[in-house]
Image (cartoon, helix red, strand yellow):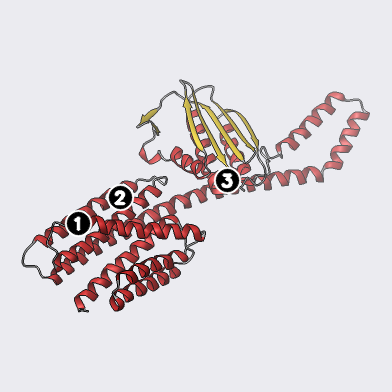
Amino acid sequence: MRMFDIVLTVIIELARIFITLEYFRIFLDCESRFKEMLAGLLAFLLTTGCFLIISNNYINTLSTIAGIIIISLVYEGKIRSKLLLSILCYSIMVALDFIVYMVTAVNIVTEQYQVVAAFVSVLFFYIVIMMLRLGFRKKLKSEFMGQWYILFIVSIMSVCTLFAVYKESGLSSYGILFMSTSVLILNLMLYVFYSNMLDRYIFMQENENLKQQMHYYDAQMKTNIENDKKIRAIRHDMKHHIREINSLAEAGKLYELKKYSDELMGDINGSETVFNTGNITLDGIFNYYNGKFKDKCIETDINVVVPENMGISAMDINIIMGNLLDNAYENAIKVKDSYIKVNVKYNGNMLYIYVSNTFDGKVEEENGNIVSLKGKEHGYGLENINRIAEKYGGNIKIEHSDKRFVVSVIMYIIN
């Protein structure tokens, strides 16, 4: 086999392996990048070795399928899911090769054409994986998502460039191979750069959510510590309180007795945590926001009936309740006679959240979706709530009148 064929095979197979790894990352998680790279290397050696040494169509097909399955095995999940994803991946490859052949069949089959067709097929595989990744991550809407279309435009222009290069007379097979490899590397580098930027942005969002969650926990712990100090002080002085109560009772001073007992009850009530459902995440959130509502004299009606462990991650609860109560607070303070009503109930593996608040009646909608009046950078609250609800097979419902804004969320928990 000529050196040219070996170089072409190595480049094409490396690109296919890289894109295949990205394909499985869309659907499955892997705890180790080293295992991913090792599986990719084994798949590359298997497929490339069979093609260069044996060069039999049936053997090449089996080695390609085996290589895809080897890659799938390092990811988490059921074997059945991995096999189905492997078959789908190979089907996509075969379908794209067939499409490229049918579309370009009118051309004279030359060595230059075969090079271009091979790279175009890989580019189409890359485009399909980008589309799958975009569809899968659409729920993670962010300002970066629109940049996917730049990658699509670049990849389509790359296909057109390759055909233009092929039509250019005077270029040797090695010249076309060099141009095609450069175009492919450029596309893959842009993909890696953008993918890393998106992952970084998502990490930053999750980090901010964790900071907010820790803020709630910190506020709850400070409240608990302060209340514990009050309880200890009351216990320490309890004998003095009892002696004083007895003295007032014996003296028949009922007015002074009632006044003293009321003051003592006030201290006891003041040392109690407002919300003590047993779920530390919700307790922290509601106790924190209850303080904010009181500071602005917002009338509240909050009912929470949940078990200690609901089967929902603390971060997801934080995202939903934090955004809902933030929005309710910011809307309620804009009007007189502000009022917020919250119902959180867990029943039969279903979590129901209802938040209603007064507001000034100003609502802006875009494509049927509520848009924040504070600007685009603040418009992700309801989207994040909806994303979490869909994660648990639920949904979000938004209603509003001239004076009342209502958000209802339902989630289904499978333990």
The percent position of residue 282, horizontal first and vertical second, equals 61, 42
Q: Label 1: how many residues lie within 10 Å, few (<14), some (14-19) or many (20+)?
A: many
Seen in the picture, residue 159 relative to 139 is either above or below; the reply is below
Residue 227, quarter of picture: top right
Q: CA distance from mark 1 to mark 3?
A: 52 Å
Amino acid type at mark 1: Val
Seen in the picture, residue 98 relative to 404 is either above or below; the reply is below
Residue 137 seen in this snapshot = no
Q: Label 2: how many residues lie within 10 Å, few (<14), some (14-19) or many (20+)?
A: some
Q: CA distance from mark 3 to mark 2?
A: 36 Å
Give the residue at mark 1. Answer: 159
Q: Specify whether 72 is left or right of 197.
A: right
Q: Return the residue nearer the eye: 171 or 329.
A: 171
The percent position of residue 141, horizontal first and vertical second, equals 39, 45
User: In the image, what residue occupies the spot 81% across and 31% down?
Assistant: 261
Q: Label 3: how many residues lie within 10 Å, few (<14), some (14-19) or many (20+)?
A: many
Amino acid type at mark 3: Tyr
Q: Return the residue nearer the eye: 177 or 201.
A: 177
Residue 114 seen in this snapshot = yes
Amino acid type at mark 2: Trp
Secondary element at image label 1: helix
Query: Looking at the image, is mark 1 or mark 3 nearer the viewer?
Result: 1
Residue reaching furthest to the right: 250
Q: CA distance from mark 2 to mark 1?
A: 17 Å
Q: Are marks 1 and 3 in contact (CB under 8 Å)?
A: no
Q: Which mark is residue 148?
A: 2
**Labels in figure, total:** 3
Q: Specify whether 257 is left or right of 399.
A: right
**Upstream in sequence: badge 3 or badge 2:** 2
Q: Return the residue nearer the eye: 157 or 95.
A: 95
Q: Are marks 3 and 2 in contact (CB under 8 Å)?
A: no
